[in-house]
Image (cartoon, grey):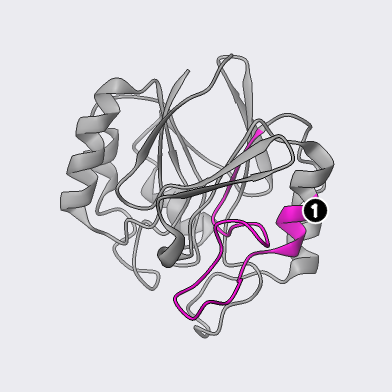
Amino acid sequence: MNLLLFSDLHADVPAARRLAALATQADLLIGAGDFGNSRRHVADCLPTLLEAGKPAVFVPGNSESFEELTDACRNFPNARVLHGTNSVIEGLTFFGLGGGIPVTPFGSWSYDFTEEQAAALLKDCPPAAVLVTHSPPKGAVDIATSGKSLGSTAIRAAIERTRPRLVVCGHIHASAGQQAQIGPTPIINPGPQGVLHELQT
């Protein structure tokens, strides 16, 4: 299955147009959150991204809530919004977790969760799924411009426990376009430029 991975569009419609052109080569789109900006303009990029009619798996970022992204996708039946939930597409299980983890310093507008809340939301993640999270795991594609590692310990623990086939994340803009490995699992922070990834089924 050919996947088009992306994250952190932040209402950038020209970037969405470039992704839509890449989507012609993909079987499925995976968006790892931050479709809008500070809880606004969540839907701006969706018509462009989804005009090709490809199925899509999305999680909310910290710039939009699960409810806001679900509402923005209401006219797009091919889009599945996951948050502590899973979906099976063509025999592959996808599990999603959105939000900023751990809690960000951005204030009340940011859709954030503590490590404890994230661990509870991840408890039903099945083994060998494709895990889509907004925040990266601790120690992988999580280095900010400050040089600090800002990833989630709960997400890393879930990866070590369930050994996903692939992890797609975002959130840390300075690590966009980077890849890492935790055990056998590839971790990709695709950023708004997008990454085409072939997943063997």
In the image, is 162 to the left or to the right of 145? right
Q: Which residues are magenta?
A: 130-157
User: Magenta stretch: residue 147 in it?
Assistant: yes
- In the image, is residue 113 above or below residue 107? above
Q: Main secondary structure of the magenta part?
A: loop
Residue depicted at x 45% and y 58%: 68
Indicate the position of residue 31 as horizontal and vertical percent values: 43, 44
Judging from the image, what secondary structure is the residue with disc 1 in?
Answer: helix
Residue underneath mark 1 = 157
Residue depicted at x 15% and y 51%: 14
In the image, is 44 to the left or to the right of 136? left
User: Magenta stretch: residue 13 in it?
Assistant: no
- In the image, is residue 66 above or below residue 195? below
In the image, is 2 to the left or to the right of 21? right
In the image, is 108 to the left or to the right of 197? right
Residue depicted at x 74% and y 45%: 159
Three-letter code, disc 1 = Ala
Position of the C terminus by quadrant:
top right
